[in-house]
Image: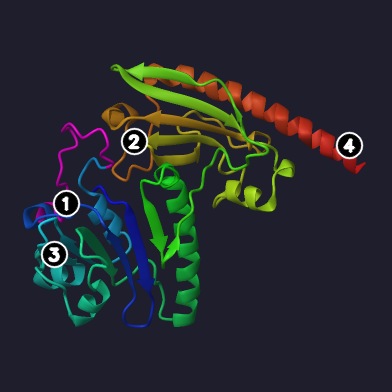
Amino acid sequence: AKASEIQITYGIDRYSSFVRVEDNGKGMNEKELLNAMKFGSFNPLNERNENDLGRFGLGLKTASFSQCRRLTVKTRNKSGKEFIKCWDLDFVAIKKDWVLLRNCADKNSEKNLADFTSDKSGTIILWEKLDRLVESSELKSDKEHFYRKFDNVRKHLGITFHRFIESNEVSIFVLNEEVKAVNPFNVSVEVPSTELAEEQLSIRNQQIKIQPFVLPHESKLSHDERKQLQIIKGWTEHQGIYLYRNRRLIADGTWLDLNFRKKESQRLCRICIDIPNTLDTEWQIDVKKASAKIPDVIRKRIKSICFSSIEKAIKIYTCLLYTSDAADE
C-alpha cells in the first residue's frame, strides 16, 4: 500500500499477549476497510496491478487466524479519517454469526492497538488471543519459545522481502531493530557467487527470468557470511529454486515438482526464477503464495537448466572437498 516503513512490535504476558504491525502506507476509507476484512474480497481472475503482491483477498484474514483468534485493524487515510474493525472468533462463536465489531473488543485491545506513531496515513494490524504463538500456560516457557519464533520471523522477513529492503523501498523494524536483507545468492564482495548463464523464457508473451548461481564454498567465507547463507534451515536444505513473484520471494530452497532430491554435494546450487503476477494460473500459485508448480510448457527447459547448474555446483563442491582433505592429510 505504498508503505516505506513497517514497524512490528509484540508483548507477552499471562493475560495480554499481542503482535502489532503498523505501516505508513496510504491507509483506507471505511468501505475499503470493510472489503479488506471480508474473506475472498478479490476475484483472483481479475486483472491485477503489475506491482500487486495480492491475489485472492484472503491473506490478511487467513494469515491472522492461523496465529490468533482476534484480529483488529485500524486505518487512517490521507484525509485524516480513522476507522477500526475487529474480528473476534470467540465473539463469533457466542453469537453463532459472523459479526464484525466496529471498535476494539475491550479496553486492553485499545491499549495494545494504541495510536499511530506519526500524523500521516497508515494501517495498524493487531493480533490478540495468540493461540499459536503462545501454546501453554507456563509463562517462562512461552516467552522463550515466543522470542525464538521471532528470531526466525526476522530472518524470514529479511529473505522474503530482501529485494525491497536492498533497494531502500521499504524498511522493516522488529521492536525498533531494523531487519537486515538476507540475500540468498550474493553475500561476499571478495568471494562472490558464480553467476551462470541467465536465460529468459516466455508464456503468453510474459517474461520469465532464470538465473542460476553456484555459491562459494563455506571455507572461503567469513563466519558471518556462512551464517547468512545458512538462513534458517542450513545450506543443504536451502539448495534449489528460489521463486520470486513481483520480486517477493514465495518459495525458497525447493526443487518444486522436478523430483530432484536434496543432496549434500548439491548444496552450493541456488537458482533464481522471476515471474510476474500475470502468470499465477500457469504456475498454480496457491492461496498462501507459498508453493507453485512449473508450467508444462517450460518444465523440460527449466529441468535442463537445473540439471546443468547442479553438475557445476557438484564439481566445485567436490573439488574443494578433495583439496581440503588433501591439505588435512
Report the Cα–Cα distance between label 1 and label 2. Answer: 23 Å
Work out which residue is located at the far front of the displayed protein and give it.
119
Three-letter code, disc 3:
Lys
Tell me the tag on residue 58.
Answer: none
Bounds of the magenta span?
34-53
Left or right: residue 277 versus residue 26 is right
Q: Is residue 275 magenta?
A: no
Q: Label 3: few (<14), some or many (≥20) within 10 Å?
A: many
Q: Earlier in the sequence, mark 1 or mark 4?
A: 1
Q: Label 4: few (<14), some or many (≥20) within 10 Å?
A: few
Q: Are marks 2 and 4 in contact (CB under 8 Å)?
A: no
Where residue 249 appears, as percent x and y from the top left, is 41, 41
Residue under pointer 4 = 326
Report the Cα–Cα distance between label 2 and label 4. Answer: 46 Å
Where residue 223 appears, as percent x and y from the top left, is 68, 52
Three-letter code, disc 1:
Phe
Residue under pointer 2 = 246
Q: Is residue 43 magenta?
A: yes
Q: Secondary structure at mark 1?
A: loop
- Choose between 162 and 259: the one closer to the eye: 162
Q: Label 2: few (<14), some or many (≥20) within 10 Å?
A: some
Foreground: disc 2 or disc 3:
2
Residue under pointer 1 = 39
Where residue 94 appears, as percent x and y from the top left, is 13, 73
Residue under pointer 3 = 85
The image quadrant of residue 162 is: top left
Q: Label 1: few (<14), some or many (≥20) within 10 Å?
A: some
